[in-house]
Amino acid sequence: MTRVSFLAGATGPWSIERIEAIRGETLAQATALARVESEGEIVPAGRAVWTLSGVRSHERYLERAERERLARQQEDLGRPGSRRAALIPIHKRPTWWQLAQDERRELFEGRSRHIAIGSSYLPAIARRLYHSRDLGGPFDFLTWFEFADEDASAFDELVGRLRETEEWRYVDREVDVRLRR
Ligand code: HEM
């Protein structure tokens, strides 16, 4: 299983532009961030101000046709033109987790149109979803996005639209970390 650690501190390939609490408690200020993916245990080198860990996991909500469409539209992380990134850790309320799988899918896509909205920002925004709920960390999800300077305002529009959805009423902690390299 691929693990990830986000290490915030004094050094790292991404410099932190700002850390903003959208809902709930913020994360401590730091100047740089590293995203480290590995198949084994990740041992942080040096001192981190904070570390968030997650895993890449299977998809929960995608239907086959949606998965195939996304696979055609999406681009990978690490594009040379992606000078900007965002790390958005998210925690959802217990009421979300008490719903049944079909109710969550209906809320996520049927009513909130998460995939439909997100897809209209492809391929400009490259994304990766990590899960951290089962690791017992402070967040359920660690979401990561990369994009070019000229797509920064489109990304702001995208997060603005998602935050107005019914799905987001179940978000009780969200921190928006913006980065440049
Ligand atoms: C770039 C456009 C985006 C696309 C195409 C997209 C697509 C998706 C898809 C397909 C899933 C479901 C994965 C599964 O089946 O388990 C998902 C989950 C998720 N996305 Fe997005 N997304 C986008 C942007 C965003 C943004 C900007 C945020 C945060 C502000 C976000 C936060 C999440 C979260 C937290 C989940 C997990 C939801 C859950 O399992 O309860 N997404 N996204």
Image (cartoon, rainbow, N blue to C red):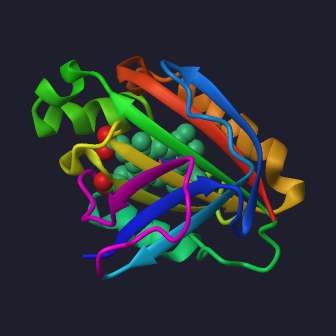
Which stretch is magenta? 40-61
Q: Does the magenta stretch include residue 108?
A: no
Question: Hey, which quadrant is residue 34 in on the image?
Answer: bottom right
Figure quadrant of the C terminus: bottom right
In the displayed structure image, the side of residue 151 where residue 108 appears, left or right: left
Figure quadrant of the N terminus: bottom left
Residue ID at (22%, 43%): 136
Residue ID at (43%, 36%): 90
In the displayed structure image, the side of residue 140 where residue 125 appears, left or right: right
In the displayed structure image, the side of residue 102 where residue 8 appears, left or right: right
Magenta segment's dominant SS is loop
Front one among 49 and 76: 49
Q: Is residue 45 magenta?
A: yes
Q: Which residue lies furthest to the front in this view?
A: 46
Confirm whether residue 103 shows in the render.
yes
Considering only vertical position in the picture, is 139 above or below 9? above
Confirm whether residue 117 shows in the render.
no
- Location of residue 69 in the rendering, given as x and y in whole percent from the top left corner: 46, 68
Residue ID at (50%, 21%): 25
In the displayed structure image, the side of residue 42 where residue 58 appears, left or right: left
Considering only vertical position in the picture, is 150 above or below 83? above
